[in-house]
């Protein structure tokens, strides 16, 4: 599909097809996540990547495979997440990946989310020079005591020092990007540090985002919401405005998932899934971009079945993970 033909199809079909929840689409996703690897250096209790309660094949995305994937999606996407499961900065080619995307697809906004416990000086400078648009730093504490309760194996002083490296590199190279955001998930054990983390972020010259925690990431699709809330009650910040699991929040939450219409996730091994909530991507893949072109995958029988299932249209009964997710109430985050 040439860019010109694509733009015509997108203009003509996208709005109509989204409005009518079409199962076959004439446009490509605008938001793309490419996983650089599903290996992590921390052991967060509610994430299967580090604690390895769920067993999946582990590995890193090679640069050649990355180019093969991004070349198919880059011309049409607006937003690229270079992360999913795992710590993206563990991939030795991460700077080259950012650089390639920004040089070839100027319109593309490139984002990394990291625990930032590792950031060599040359990598910090490389990411700035490459043109990274946003660095999300996951650190759920303003003190080591609160931070390490969830980010097991991490060191907050190291994270703060690495944020300072990025800020200094921006100044050195006279860059306004990347936007650096300290992402603070509110749990029961760190509710009291919200004001302090805002003060520390301000002193560093970085932004801060305060958000509610999620229940066990490995189980968000596979277990009903009520069951997940009960199992992870020790982490839920009762009495906080950031608690997403109150009766009021649950009553007003979304009950339709638009992701198979506008986003896609490609894991390190080329497996294609409709969103980042799916941990065992080999088991639940809708296709593999290292084996067939994305254009064939995007409208194959599994993808169309998933769209029919979510939209409440007659479905054929093909086994798709979106059916399980819908049955269990969908995760509570975008």
Image (tube, grey):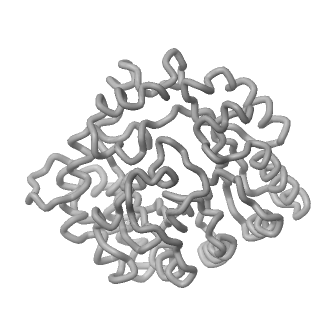
Q: Position of residue 270 (x, y in %)?
A: 41, 74
Q: Give the residue displayed 55% in from the left and 29% down from the top.
A: 187
Q: Which of the 4 image quadrants contains residue 40? A: bottom right
Q: For this view, does 213 lie left or right of residue 251?
A: right
Q: Is residue 66 above or below residue 53?
A: below
Q: Position of residue 104 (x, y in %)?
A: 62, 78
User: Left or right: where does residue 296 sit relative to residue 239?
Assistant: left
Q: Position of residue 199 (x, y in %)?
A: 79, 29
Total count of labels: 0
User: In this picture, is 227 found above or below 26?
Assistant: above
The residue lying at 24 percent from left, 44 percent from top is 326
Asked whether 321 or 274 is in front, the reply is 321
Give the residue at x 72% y 51%. Answer: 179
In this view, 256 is above or below 282? above
Q: Is residue 92 left or right of residue 34?
A: right
**Quadrant housing the N terminus:** bottom left
Q: Can residue 102 be seen from the camera position used here?
A: no
Q: Is residue 163 visible?
A: yes
- Which corner quadrant of the image does residue 110 belong to? bottom right
- Of residues 195 and 104, the one drawn nearer to the viewer in this rendering: 195
Q: Position of residue 285 (x, y in %)?
A: 30, 66
Q: Quadrant of the C terminus?
A: top left
Horizontal side of residue 138 vs 212, given as left or right:
right
- Residue furthest toward the right? 172
* In this view, 45 is above or below 187: below
Which residue appears at 36% of the width and 31% of the height? 231
């Amino acid at each position: 599909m040439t860019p010109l033909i694509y733009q015509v199809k997108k203009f003509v079909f996208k709005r109509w097809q989204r409005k009518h929840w079409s199962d076959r689409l004439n446009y490509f996703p605008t938001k793309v996540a490419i996983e650089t690897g599903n290996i992590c250096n921390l052991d967060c209790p509610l994430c299967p990547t580090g604690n390895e309660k769920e067993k999946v094949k582990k590995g890193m995305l090679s640069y050649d495979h990355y180019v093969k994937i991004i070349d198919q999606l880059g011309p049409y996407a607006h937003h690229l997440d270079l992360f999913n499961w795992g710590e993206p900065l563990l991939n030795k080619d991460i700077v080259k990946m950012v650089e390639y995307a920004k040089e070839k697809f100027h319109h593309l906004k490139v984002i990394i989310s990291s625990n930032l416990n590792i950031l060599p000086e040359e990598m910090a400078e490389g990411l700035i020079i490459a043109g990274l648009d946003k660095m999300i730093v996951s650190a759920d504490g303003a003190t080591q005591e609160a931070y390490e309760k969830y980010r097991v194996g991490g060191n907050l002083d190291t994270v703060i020092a690495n944020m300072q490296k990025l800020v200094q590199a921006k100044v050195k190279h006279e860059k306004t990007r990347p936007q650096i955001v300290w992402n603070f998930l509110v749990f029961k054990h760190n509710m009291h540090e919200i004001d302090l983390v805002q003060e520390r972020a301000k002193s560093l010259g970085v932004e801060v985002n305060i958000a509610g925690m999620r229940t066990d990431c490995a189980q968000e699709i596979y277990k009903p919401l009520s069951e997940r809330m009960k199992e992870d009650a020790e982490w839920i910040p009762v009495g906080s405005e950031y608690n997403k699991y109150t009766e009021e929040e649950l009553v007003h939450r979304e009950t339709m998932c638009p992701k198979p219409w506008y986003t896609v996730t490609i894991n390190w091994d080329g497996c294609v899934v409709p969103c980042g909530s799916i941990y065992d991507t080999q088991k639940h893949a809708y296709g593999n971009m290292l084996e067939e072109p994305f254009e064939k995958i995007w409208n194959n029988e599994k993808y169309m079945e998933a769209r029919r299932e979510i939209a409440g249209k007659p479905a054929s009964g093909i086994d798709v993970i979106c059916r399980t997710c819908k049955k269990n109430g969908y995760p509570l985050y975008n």
